[in-house]
Image (cartoon, rainbow, N blue to C red):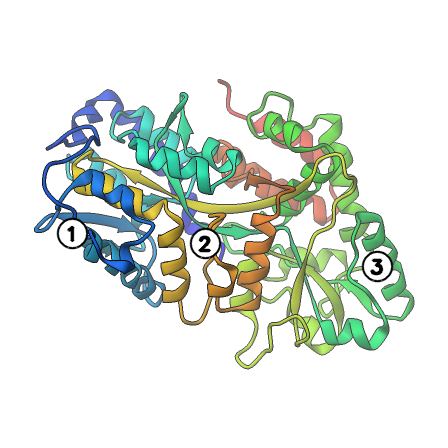
Amino acid sequence: MRSRNTRRWAAAAAALTGAGLALAGCASSDSGGGGSASGTWPGEGKSECKGLEQLADFGDLTGKTVSVYTSILPPEQQAQEDSYKLFTTCTGAEVKYEGSDQFETQLVVRVKAGNAPDIAYIPQPGLLKTVVSSGSAVEAPSQVSDNVDKWFGEDWRNYGTVDGKLYAAPLGASVKSFVWFSPKMFADNGWTVPETWDDMLSLTDDIAAKGIKPWCAGFESGDATGWPGTDWLEDAVLRSAGPDVYDQWVNHDIPFNDSAIETSLDDVGKILKDDKYVNGGFGDVNSIATTAFQDGGLPILKGDCAMYRMASFYAAQWPEGTDVSQGGDVFAFYLPTMSDEFGKPVLGGGEFVTAFSDRQEVQAFQTYLSTDVWANEKAKATPGGGWVSANKGLDINNLKSPIDKLSAETLQDPNAVFRFDGSDQMPSAVGAGSFWKEMTAWITGESTDQALTNVENSWPAS
């Protein structure tokens, strides 16, 4: 699920920035550099270590331990730990896993105290940049760089790169550019999954003509109310203005209220601010602001609405027993493009493997996690599904759930152009503040121009 706990990275970033270069001594180095190590490789001759020959560069690591710190907790934690067993088999090193629901806050505390973990799974490019600028992170070894070039797209490499140097390989991923629907409802009514944005608008009219609200939506999320609206806008910007303009907007190289962004929000408004189209099962347009995003798609099961734009993690919100599959009670389709000009934009999120030490065993573990072998080990170790990676070497058949397979297919599409969630990259005063607030005000009546101008005026001075 999209955890708004990741918003704690903003506070973490501020704390690390305040610590400044005093953190430079936190990164430890026992053997330095990532070159070849002496000794034999425990994986030599073992069939299960095929594809992991890079690990021979680090020699025999028997008796060594790598500490990993992450926000991934039970029940997902077990699959993570199980996926590390092959690393121990092939290197001799053990992995000490520690999960915390206070990850972002405690990571800062530990780094400032000189007690950083060997590896942390950082969920935000913004936090990664701050950690690197503090002097506490260690550049990834050449083996990881080679794997990122081989198994991930350039867009993913860019998110793990700071000042031209690769620090972190991607780990897991999520896809946000999805629309949930009922395959059974579509089949019963003769509706087909739209291939273009215009097709989707035509379908919206056809559904409304049958007396069914085409869309349901929910922006409520406690202190983070409004974030689902930010995802709607980000997806529209990618489709209407394109990835380059999206990047300029996220980085504030163009004003938040640039005309291209106004056009995109108006495109969203043609759906979400029309009472004929929303809010199936809940009320009128205004009800979107008070409908919890967790509940937003549930009316699909009752036939009260037909579509709900929400990320892949929404699979966990359907009631127990719901058939989530291509011909089942619910499934998802890719939010269509507006033109062929910008490829196939994919909005999403993910984690990045960040090291605070360049010891041989740490670099070996980084290397392992950046391989196609680990991606498939992790997929096989996740019994109920709920995990996917953008690693191009991931065998989709190893994924357990249909929505995971759809996510992987979307990420691996050669036309896919991935962009990380925009609000999660903006300054916290905007991405975790005014952007949420103004999307809520906009859905309850504020004009497009006023909402975007208010966010623009809130952008911190550089």
Q: Nearer the viewer, residue 32 or 175?
A: 32
Seen in the image, is 103 located left or right of residue 451? left
State the image coordinates of residue 459 (x, y, percent, origin top left).
Answer: 55, 26
Are there few (<14), some (14-19), or many (20+) residues within 10 Å of tag 3?
A: many
Q: Are marks 2 and 1 in contact (CB under 8 Å)?
A: no
The label on residue 3 is 2
Q: Secondary structure at mark 2?
A: loop
Spatial CA distance of label 2 from label 1 is 39 Å
Q: Position of residue 115 (x, y in %)?
A: 15, 39
Residue found 36% across the figure and 44% down from its top: 370
Q: Which residue is mark 1?
A: 42
Task: Say which amino acid is labelled 2.
Answer: Ser
The tag on residue 102 is none
- Residue count near mark 1 (Cα–Cα under 10 Å), binned few <14, some 14–19, many ≥20: many
First reached walking from the N terminus: tag 1 or tag 3: 1
Q: Is residue 238 above or below residue 289?
A: above
Instruction: Indicate the secondary structure of the residue bearing disc 3.
Output: helix
Residue lying furthest right: 209
Q: Earlier in the sequence, mark 3 or mark 2?
A: 2
Drawn side of residue 291 relative to residue 1, left or right: right
CA gap, disc 1 and disc 3: 59 Å
**Can you identify the residue that label 3 sits on?**
204
Residue at 71%, 67% in the rendered image: 282
SS at circle 1: loop
Residue pictured at 59% horizontal, 29% vertical: 247
